[in-house]
Image: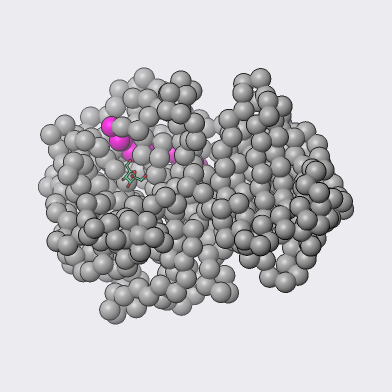
Amino acid sequence: MNDPKPFFWNGSYHVFFQHNPHGAFWGTMHWGHAVSRDLLHWEELPVALAPTPGGPDKDGCFTGCVVKGDEDRFHILYTGVDPQVQCLATSDDPNLIVWRKYEKNPVIGEKPAGFGACFRDPQAWKEADGTWLMVVGSELSDRRGGAALLYQSPDGRLTDWEFVHALFAGHEHETGFDFECPDFFPLGHGGWRVLLSSRNKTWWHAGDFDRENLAFERAAWGPTDGGGLFYAAKTLFDDQNRRLLFGWIREDRPENEQKAAGWSGVLSLPRVLSRLPDGALGQEPAREIETLRAARTTRPGVRVPGNGAGVPLGTFPDTLETQVRFAPNAPGERLGLRLEWTDGARLEIAHDRTANRLNDAPLTLAPGEPLTLRVFVDRSVVEVFANGRACQTLRVYPKPEALGRVTLALFAHGGSVTADADVWEMTAAPVERRRRKAAPLPAQPT
Ligand code: FRU
Protein backbone atom coordinates (compact mmCIF):
# COMPACT_ATOMS: atom_id res chain seq x y z
CA MET A 1 0.00 0.00 0.00
CA ASN A 2 0.80 3.65 -0.25
CA ASP A 3 -1.18 6.88 0.18
CA PRO A 4 -4.12 6.44 2.58
CA LYS A 5 -7.34 8.35 1.77
CA PRO A 6 -9.32 8.28 5.01
CA PHE A 7 -13.05 8.94 5.21
CA PHE A 8 -15.51 8.72 8.12
CA TRP A 9 -19.18 8.00 7.73
CA ASN A 10 -21.95 6.51 9.84
CA GLY A 11 -19.75 5.28 12.68
CA SER A 12 -17.15 3.69 10.40
CA TYR A 13 -13.60 4.68 9.64
CA HIS A 14 -12.81 3.91 6.01
CA VAL A 15 -9.30 4.02 4.67
CA PHE A 16 -8.85 3.74 0.92
CA PHE A 17 -5.28 3.39 -0.24
CA GLN A 18 -3.04 2.98 -3.26
CA HIS A 19 -2.66 -0.71 -3.88
CA ASN A 20 -1.06 -3.05 -6.38
CA PRO A 21 -2.97 -6.35 -6.43
CA HIS A 22 -0.16 -7.98 -8.41
CA GLY A 23 2.51 -7.89 -5.75
CA ALA A 24 4.40 -6.05 -3.04
CA PHE A 25 5.81 -3.36 -5.30
CA TRP A 26 4.57 -0.08 -6.74
CA GLY A 27 2.63 -0.45 -10.02
CA THR A 28 -0.85 -0.84 -11.62
CA MET A 29 -2.39 1.37 -8.99
CA HIS A 30 -5.82 0.34 -7.72
CA TRP A 31 -7.76 1.68 -4.76
CA GLY A 32 -7.69 -0.77 -1.87
CA HIS A 33 -10.24 -0.35 0.90
CA ALA A 34 -10.32 -1.17 4.62
CA VAL A 35 -12.87 -0.33 7.29
CA SER A 36 -12.86 -0.16 11.08
CA ARG A 37 -15.34 0.87 13.75
CA ASP A 38 -12.77 1.34 16.50
CA LEU A 39 -9.60 2.49 14.68
CA LEU A 40 -7.88 -0.71 15.80
CA HIS A 41 -9.54 -3.69 14.16
CA TRP A 42 -9.55 -3.35 10.41
CA GLU A 43 -11.27 -5.39 7.78
CA GLU A 44 -9.94 -5.32 4.24
CA LEU A 45 -12.76 -4.96 1.69
CA PRO A 46 -12.76 -5.57 -2.07
CA VAL A 47 -10.79 -3.27 -4.34
CA ALA A 48 -12.80 -0.06 -4.88
CA LEU A 49 -11.27 1.21 -8.13
CA ALA A 50 -9.30 -0.56 -10.85
CA PRO A 51 -7.86 0.94 -14.05
CA THR A 52 -10.18 0.71 -17.06
CA PRO A 53 -8.42 -0.51 -20.22
CA GLY A 54 -8.56 2.29 -22.79
CA GLY A 55 -9.94 4.75 -20.21
CA PRO A 56 -8.34 7.91 -18.82
CA ASP A 57 -7.12 5.84 -15.85
CA LYS A 58 -5.81 2.96 -17.97
CA ASP A 59 -2.33 3.29 -16.40
CA GLY A 60 -3.53 3.66 -12.84
CA CYS A 61 -6.03 5.10 -10.41
CA PHE A 62 -3.86 7.46 -8.38
CA THR A 63 -4.58 9.27 -5.16
CA GLY A 64 -7.60 11.46 -4.45
CA CYS A 65 -10.34 11.79 -1.87
CA VAL A 66 -13.70 10.42 -0.78
CA VAL A 67 -16.50 12.88 -0.03
CA LYS A 68 -20.17 12.70 0.85
CA GLY A 69 -22.44 14.45 -1.63
CA ASP A 70 -26.16 15.10 -1.31
CA GLU A 71 -28.33 12.49 0.39
CA ASP A 72 -26.41 9.28 0.85
CA ARG A 73 -24.26 9.57 -2.26
CA PHE A 74 -20.52 9.35 -2.10
CA HIS A 75 -17.91 10.52 -4.56
CA ILE A 76 -14.31 9.67 -5.20
CA LEU A 77 -12.22 12.25 -7.01
CA TYR A 78 -8.95 10.71 -8.12
CA THR A 79 -6.17 11.07 -10.65
CA GLY A 80 -6.20 8.92 -13.76
CA VAL A 81 -2.88 8.42 -15.59
CA ASP A 82 -1.25 8.84 -18.10
CA PRO A 83 -1.42 11.86 -18.68
CA GLN A 84 -2.51 13.05 -15.24
CA VAL A 85 -6.22 13.96 -15.35
CA GLN A 86 -8.86 14.17 -12.62
CA CYS A 87 -11.67 11.61 -12.58
CA LEU A 88 -14.89 11.00 -10.67
CA ALA A 89 -16.57 7.86 -9.34
CA THR A 90 -19.82 7.65 -7.39
CA SER A 91 -21.43 5.24 -4.96
CA ASP A 92 -24.88 4.78 -3.43
CA ASP A 93 -23.61 1.86 -1.41
CA PRO A 94 -23.77 2.61 2.35
CA ASN A 95 -20.77 0.32 2.81
CA LEU A 96 -18.79 2.22 0.12
CA ILE A 97 -17.83 -1.06 -1.55
CA VAL A 98 -19.38 -0.64 -5.01
CA TRP A 99 -18.29 2.34 -7.14
CA ARG A 100 -19.36 3.51 -10.59
CA LYS A 101 -17.05 5.63 -12.70
CA TYR A 102 -18.49 8.76 -14.31
CA GLU A 103 -19.05 7.96 -18.00
CA LYS A 104 -17.65 11.31 -19.17
CA ASN A 105 -14.36 11.08 -17.28
CA PRO A 106 -12.05 12.92 -16.96
CA VAL A 107 -13.72 15.83 -15.14
CA ILE A 108 -10.51 17.89 -15.51
CA GLY A 109 -8.61 16.90 -18.62
CA GLU A 110 -5.80 19.44 -18.61
CA LYS A 111 -3.66 21.28 -16.12
CA PRO A 112 -3.80 25.09 -16.13
CA ALA A 113 -1.07 26.86 -18.12
CA GLY A 114 2.09 27.95 -16.36
CA PHE A 115 2.50 25.07 -13.91
CA GLY A 116 4.91 22.13 -13.93
CA ALA A 117 4.33 18.43 -14.53
CA CYS A 118 2.68 17.42 -11.26
CA PHE A 119 -1.11 17.60 -11.57
CA ARG A 120 -2.64 15.05 -9.26
CA ASP A 121 -4.27 13.97 -6.00
CA PRO A 122 -7.50 16.04 -5.88
CA GLN A 123 -9.03 16.84 -2.50
CA ALA A 124 -12.57 18.25 -2.57
CA TRP A 125 -14.71 19.66 0.24
CA LYS A 126 -17.98 21.46 0.78
CA GLU A 127 -17.94 24.88 2.42
CA ALA A 128 -20.58 25.74 5.05
CA ASP A 129 -22.51 27.74 2.39
CA GLY A 130 -22.72 24.71 0.10
CA THR A 131 -19.94 25.69 -2.35
CA TRP A 132 -17.78 22.80 -3.52
CA LEU A 133 -14.07 23.54 -3.71
CA MET A 134 -11.11 21.33 -4.49
CA VAL A 135 -7.34 21.50 -4.41
CA VAL A 136 -5.14 19.57 -6.83
CA GLY A 137 -1.45 18.98 -6.11
CA SER A 138 0.89 20.72 -8.53
CA GLU A 139 4.15 22.62 -8.84
CA LEU A 140 5.43 25.99 -10.02
CA SER A 141 7.36 26.01 -13.29
CA ASP A 142 11.08 25.13 -13.13
CA ARG A 143 10.56 23.14 -9.93
CA ARG A 144 10.55 26.30 -7.80
CA GLY A 145 8.07 24.90 -5.30
CA GLY A 146 4.85 23.03 -4.77
CA ALA A 147 1.46 24.56 -5.53
CA ALA A 148 -2.08 23.72 -4.44
CA LEU A 149 -4.41 24.58 -7.31
CA LEU A 150 -7.87 25.67 -6.23
CA TYR A 151 -10.95 24.68 -8.24
CA GLN A 152 -14.64 25.33 -7.82
CA SER A 153 -17.57 23.24 -9.00
CA PRO A 154 -20.04 25.91 -10.21
CA ASP A 155 -23.15 23.71 -9.95
CA GLY A 156 -21.92 21.56 -7.06
CA ARG A 157 -22.30 18.36 -9.11
CA LEU A 158 -18.55 17.67 -9.07
CA THR A 159 -18.56 16.93 -12.79
CA ASP A 160 -17.46 20.43 -13.89
CA TRP A 161 -14.60 22.29 -12.30
CA GLU A 162 -13.32 25.83 -12.88
CA PHE A 163 -9.76 26.77 -11.99
CA VAL A 164 -9.72 29.68 -9.51
CA HIS A 165 -6.02 30.25 -8.71
CA ALA A 166 -3.14 28.72 -6.82
CA LEU A 167 -4.37 28.66 -3.22
CA PHE A 168 -0.81 28.49 -1.95
CA ALA A 169 2.68 27.86 -3.33
CA GLY A 170 5.74 26.80 -1.33
CA HIS A 171 9.49 27.12 -1.85
CA GLU A 172 11.50 24.22 -3.19
CA HIS A 173 14.13 24.54 -0.44
CA GLU A 174 11.49 24.47 2.29
CA THR A 175 8.76 22.00 1.35
CA GLY A 176 9.95 20.45 -1.91
CA PHE A 177 9.40 21.08 -5.60
CA ASP A 178 5.82 19.83 -5.73
CA PHE A 179 2.79 19.19 -3.53
CA GLU A 180 1.72 15.57 -3.65
CA CYS A 181 -1.44 14.55 -1.80
CA PRO A 182 -2.71 17.97 -0.64
CA ASP A 183 -5.38 18.12 2.03
CA PHE A 184 -7.08 21.31 3.27
CA PHE A 185 -9.29 21.53 6.34
CA PRO A 186 -10.39 23.77 9.22
CA LEU A 187 -8.77 23.15 12.60
CA GLY A 188 -9.97 24.61 15.89
CA HIS A 189 -12.14 27.70 15.96
CA GLY A 190 -12.26 30.72 13.66
CA GLY A 191 -11.02 30.76 10.10
CA TRP A 192 -7.87 28.74 10.82
CA ARG A 193 -7.06 26.09 8.25
CA VAL A 194 -4.33 23.62 7.59
CA LEU A 195 -2.95 22.65 4.20
CA LEU A 196 -0.98 19.41 4.01
CA SER A 197 1.44 18.66 1.21
CA SER A 198 3.93 15.87 0.60
CA ARG A 199 7.41 15.89 -0.94
CA ASN A 200 10.28 14.27 0.97
CA LYS A 201 8.05 14.54 4.05
CA THR A 202 4.43 15.41 4.72
CA TRP A 203 4.32 19.10 5.61
CA TRP A 204 1.69 21.20 7.36
CA HIS A 205 1.02 24.83 6.49
CA ALA A 206 -1.39 26.67 8.80
CA GLY A 207 -3.05 30.05 8.59
CA ASP A 208 -6.23 31.99 7.95
CA PHE A 209 -8.53 31.27 5.04
CA ASP A 210 -10.27 34.31 3.64
CA ARG A 211 -13.49 32.72 2.42
CA GLU A 212 -14.55 35.70 0.33
CA ASN A 213 -11.38 36.00 -1.71
CA LEU A 214 -10.57 32.31 -1.45
CA ALA A 215 -7.13 33.28 -0.15
CA PHE A 216 -4.99 31.34 2.28
CA GLU A 217 -2.34 33.18 4.25
CA ARG A 218 0.24 30.89 5.78
CA ALA A 219 1.29 31.86 9.31
CA ALA A 220 3.19 28.75 10.44
CA TRP A 221 4.53 25.57 8.90
CA GLY A 222 6.57 22.50 9.68
CA PRO A 223 6.93 18.76 9.08
CA THR A 224 4.26 16.37 10.39
CA ASP A 225 7.08 13.90 11.04
CA GLY A 226 10.84 14.22 11.31
CA GLY A 227 11.46 11.59 8.66
CA GLY A 228 10.27 10.76 5.19
CA LEU A 229 9.08 7.29 6.18
CA PHE A 230 5.73 8.80 7.21
CA TYR A 231 4.40 10.10 3.93
CA ALA A 232 1.36 11.07 1.82
CA ALA A 233 -0.62 11.66 5.02
CA LYS A 234 -4.24 12.82 4.86
CA THR A 235 -7.11 13.34 7.26
CA LEU A 236 -10.73 12.55 8.06
CA PHE A 237 -13.17 14.23 10.47
CA ASP A 238 -15.12 11.92 12.77
CA ASP A 239 -18.26 12.13 14.92
CA GLN A 240 -16.22 13.10 17.98
CA ASN A 241 -15.09 16.29 16.24
CA ARG A 242 -11.63 14.85 15.78
CA ARG A 243 -9.41 15.60 12.82
CA LEU A 244 -7.43 12.35 12.43
CA LEU A 245 -4.28 12.11 10.35
CA PHE A 246 -3.23 8.83 8.70
CA GLY A 247 0.07 8.35 6.92
CA TRP A 248 1.65 5.74 4.72
CA ILE A 249 4.65 4.25 6.51
CA ARG A 250 7.12 3.31 3.80
CA GLU A 251 9.56 0.46 3.81
CA ASP A 252 13.23 1.07 4.42
CA ARG A 253 14.63 -2.17 3.00
CA PRO A 254 15.54 -3.23 -0.55
CA GLU A 255 12.73 -3.91 -3.02
CA ASN A 256 13.67 -7.58 -3.44
CA GLU A 257 13.20 -8.09 0.31
CA GLN A 258 9.80 -6.37 0.16
CA LYS A 259 8.74 -8.61 -2.72
CA ALA A 260 9.99 -11.71 -0.88
CA ALA A 261 8.07 -10.67 2.26
CA GLY A 262 4.91 -10.33 0.14
CA TRP A 263 3.94 -6.98 1.63
CA SER A 264 5.14 -3.42 1.45
CA GLY A 265 3.91 -0.31 3.23
CA VAL A 266 1.68 0.01 6.28
CA LEU A 267 -0.89 2.41 7.66
CA SER A 268 0.31 4.63 10.50
CA LEU A 269 -1.41 4.96 13.82
CA PRO A 270 -4.12 7.63 13.62
CA ARG A 271 -2.99 10.99 15.00
CA VAL A 272 -5.41 13.49 16.54
CA LEU A 273 -4.59 16.97 15.24
CA SER A 274 -5.04 20.22 17.12
CA ARG A 275 -4.06 23.85 16.85
CA LEU A 276 -1.49 24.77 19.49
CA PRO A 277 -1.49 28.25 21.05
CA ASP A 278 1.46 29.34 18.86
CA GLY A 279 -0.31 28.19 15.71
CA ALA A 280 1.75 25.02 15.32
CA LEU A 281 0.22 21.61 14.72
CA GLY A 282 -0.47 19.43 17.76
CA GLN A 283 -0.34 15.67 17.21
CA GLU A 284 -1.30 12.91 19.66
CA PRO A 285 -2.02 9.23 19.10
CA ALA A 286 -5.77 8.50 19.12
CA ARG A 287 -6.70 7.37 22.63
CA GLU A 288 -8.36 4.16 21.34
CA ILE A 289 -4.88 2.69 21.01
CA GLU A 290 -4.60 2.53 24.80
CA THR A 291 -7.28 -0.17 24.88
CA LEU A 292 -4.66 -2.55 23.44
CA ARG A 293 -2.51 -2.16 26.54
CA ALA A 294 -1.77 -5.48 28.28
CA ALA A 295 0.88 -6.38 30.90
CA ARG A 296 2.46 -3.25 32.37
CA THR A 297 5.94 -2.65 33.76
CA THR A 298 6.45 0.53 35.78
CA ARG A 299 9.89 2.01 36.46
CA PRO A 300 9.57 5.22 38.50
CA GLY A 301 12.55 7.46 39.30
CA VAL A 302 15.13 5.78 37.06
CA ARG A 303 18.52 7.46 37.54
CA VAL A 304 20.18 7.87 34.14
CA PRO A 305 23.92 8.73 34.26
CA GLY A 306 25.21 11.40 31.90
CA ASN A 307 27.93 9.25 30.35
CA GLY A 308 25.80 7.75 27.56
CA ALA A 309 25.73 4.28 29.10
CA GLY A 310 22.16 3.07 28.87
CA VAL A 311 20.05 2.05 31.86
CA PRO A 312 17.99 -0.96 30.76
CA LEU A 313 14.25 -0.91 31.46
CA GLY A 314 13.96 -4.57 30.50
CA THR A 315 13.42 -6.86 27.53
CA PHE A 316 9.89 -6.97 26.13
CA PRO A 317 7.85 -8.43 23.26
CA ASP A 318 8.39 -6.24 20.18
CA THR A 319 4.75 -5.12 20.11
CA LEU A 320 4.64 -2.54 22.86
CA GLU A 321 3.89 0.97 23.99
CA THR A 322 6.20 2.89 26.26
CA GLN A 323 5.84 6.24 27.91
CA VAL A 324 8.89 7.98 29.34
CA ARG A 325 8.91 11.28 31.19
CA PHE A 326 12.30 12.82 31.84
CA ALA A 327 12.66 15.34 34.67
CA PRO A 328 12.57 18.93 33.34
CA ASN A 329 15.66 21.09 32.88
CA ALA A 330 17.99 18.12 32.41
CA PRO A 331 21.52 19.53 32.19
CA GLY A 332 22.63 17.19 29.39
CA GLU A 333 22.88 17.76 25.69
CA ARG A 334 21.16 14.64 24.43
CA LEU A 335 18.87 12.18 26.09
CA GLY A 336 16.37 9.57 25.14
CA LEU A 337 15.49 5.95 24.63
CA ARG A 338 17.47 3.19 22.94
CA LEU A 339 15.93 0.07 21.40
CA GLU A 340 18.20 -2.94 20.94
CA TRP A 341 17.76 -6.33 19.35
CA THR A 342 20.03 -9.33 19.99
CA ASP A 343 21.54 -9.21 16.48
CA GLY A 344 22.90 -5.71 17.08
CA ALA A 345 20.03 -3.85 15.38
CA ARG A 346 19.48 -0.65 17.31
CA LEU A 347 17.48 2.56 17.21
CA GLU A 348 17.94 5.74 19.16
CA ILE A 349 15.15 8.16 19.92
CA ALA A 350 16.91 11.24 21.18
CA HIS A 351 16.17 14.83 22.01
CA ASP A 352 19.07 17.16 21.28
CA ARG A 353 18.85 20.29 23.40
CA THR A 354 21.38 22.24 21.39
CA ALA A 355 19.83 21.52 18.02
CA ASN A 356 16.26 21.58 19.46
CA ARG A 357 15.41 18.39 17.65
CA LEU A 358 13.87 15.06 18.38
CA ASN A 359 15.77 12.90 15.88
CA ASP A 360 14.94 14.84 12.69
CA ALA A 361 11.84 16.66 13.99
CA PRO A 362 12.04 20.19 15.40
CA LEU A 363 11.26 20.21 19.14
CA THR A 364 12.08 23.16 21.39
CA LEU A 365 11.23 22.57 25.05
CA ALA A 366 9.95 25.54 27.03
CA PRO A 367 11.82 26.25 30.29
CA GLY A 368 10.61 23.70 32.85
CA GLU A 369 8.89 21.56 30.22
CA PRO A 370 9.76 17.88 30.65
CA LEU A 371 10.56 15.71 27.63
CA THR A 372 7.76 13.17 27.30
CA LEU A 373 8.12 10.33 24.82
CA ARG A 374 5.38 7.96 23.74
CA VAL A 375 6.74 5.20 21.58
CA PHE A 376 4.82 2.43 19.84
CA VAL A 377 6.78 -0.56 18.58
CA ASP A 378 5.02 -2.92 16.21
CA ARG A 379 7.84 -5.19 15.04
CA SER A 380 9.50 -3.29 12.17
CA VAL A 381 7.48 -0.11 12.77
CA VAL A 382 8.39 2.40 15.47
CA GLU A 383 6.21 5.49 15.91
CA VAL A 384 7.36 8.21 18.28
CA PHE A 385 5.25 11.04 19.70
CA ALA A 386 6.98 13.69 21.82
CA ASN A 387 5.36 16.42 23.90
CA GLY A 388 2.17 16.42 21.86
CA ARG A 389 3.82 18.11 18.90
CA ALA A 390 6.82 16.26 17.44
CA CYS A 391 6.70 12.88 15.72
CA GLN A 392 9.29 10.58 14.25
CA THR A 393 8.53 7.36 12.42
CA LEU A 394 11.32 4.79 12.19
CA ARG A 395 11.74 1.32 10.70
CA VAL A 396 13.98 -1.52 11.81
CA TYR A 397 14.53 -4.96 10.29
CA PRO A 398 16.30 -7.26 12.75
CA LYS A 399 17.43 -10.69 11.53
CA PRO A 400 14.79 -13.43 11.83
CA GLU A 401 16.51 -14.98 14.87
CA ALA A 402 16.41 -11.62 16.69
CA LEU A 403 12.71 -10.93 16.06
CA GLY A 404 10.20 -10.99 18.87
CA ARG A 405 12.09 -9.33 21.75
CA VAL A 406 13.47 -5.84 22.17
CA THR A 407 15.48 -4.33 25.00
CA LEU A 408 14.67 -0.77 26.05
CA ALA A 409 17.24 1.48 27.73
CA LEU A 410 17.32 5.13 28.77
CA PHE A 411 20.44 7.18 28.14
CA ALA A 412 21.78 10.71 28.62
CA HIS A 413 24.87 12.56 27.43
CA GLY A 414 26.49 15.46 29.26
CA GLY A 415 24.52 15.36 32.51
CA SER A 416 22.49 12.87 34.50
CA VAL A 417 18.70 12.91 34.68
CA THR A 418 15.88 10.95 36.28
CA ALA A 419 12.94 9.54 34.39
CA ASP A 420 9.65 7.74 35.02
CA ALA A 421 8.90 4.99 32.55
CA ASP A 422 5.99 2.69 31.80
CA VAL A 423 5.98 -0.15 29.31
CA TRP A 424 2.89 -2.00 28.14
CA GLU A 425 2.86 -5.10 26.02
CA MET A 426 0.29 -4.63 23.28
CA THR A 427 -2.50 -6.98 22.30
CA ALA A 428 -2.61 -7.99 18.63
CA ALA A 429 -5.31 -6.51 16.37
CA PRO A 430 -5.00 -8.55 13.16
CA VAL A 431 -6.54 -7.35 9.90
CA GLU A 432 -9.42 -9.44 8.62
CA ARG A 433 -9.59 -10.07 4.90
CA ARG A 434 -12.90 -10.33 3.14
CA ARG A 435 -11.07 -10.32 -0.18
CA ARG A 436 -9.02 -13.43 -0.83
CA LYS A 437 -5.69 -12.74 -2.47
CA ALA A 438 -6.44 -14.58 -5.69
CA ALA A 439 -9.98 -13.22 -6.10
CA PRO A 440 -10.61 -11.73 -9.56
CA LEU A 441 -10.80 -7.95 -9.71
CA PRO A 442 -14.26 -6.46 -10.18
CA ALA A 443 -15.10 -5.43 -13.74
CA GLN A 444 -15.33 -1.66 -14.04
CA PRO A 445 -17.62 0.02 -16.57
CA THR A 446 -16.15 3.08 -18.28
C1 FRU B 1 2.42 9.88 -3.50
C2 FRU B 1 2.05 9.55 -4.92
C3 FRU B 1 0.88 10.40 -5.39
C4 FRU B 1 0.28 9.56 -6.47
C5 FRU B 1 0.45 8.18 -5.91
C6 FRU B 1 0.63 7.09 -6.93
O1 FRU B 1 3.03 8.82 -2.84
O2 FRU B 1 3.15 9.70 -5.77
O3 FRU B 1 1.24 11.69 -5.81
O4 FRU B 1 -1.05 9.87 -6.73
O5 FRU B 1 1.56 8.22 -5.04
O6 FRU B 1 0.62 5.83 -6.34
State the count of labels: 0
Left or right, 434 with reference to 49: right
On screen, 379 above or below 239?
A: above
Residue at (47, 47) in percent of width and height:
228
The quarter holding residue 369 reads bottom right
**What colouring does the structure picture have?**
one colour
Q: In what quadrant does ligand 1 lie?
A: top left
Q: Position of residue 202 (x, y in %)?
A: 44, 54
Residue at (71, 42) in percent of width and height:
338
Residue at (21, 69) in percent of width and height:
164
Viewer-proximal residue among 343 and 391: 343
Viewer-proximal residue among 164 and 327: 327
Viewer-proximal residue among 368 and 239: 368
Left or right, 443 with reference to 432: left
Viewer-proximal residue among 162 and 206: 206
Does any portion of residue 239 appear in the rendered image? no
Left or right, 54 with reference to 334: left
On screen, 98 above or below 181?
A: above
Q: Where is residue 418 in the image (x, y as percent from the top left)?
A: 84, 55
- What's the magenta region? 28-38
Residue at (81, 57) in percent of width and height:
415
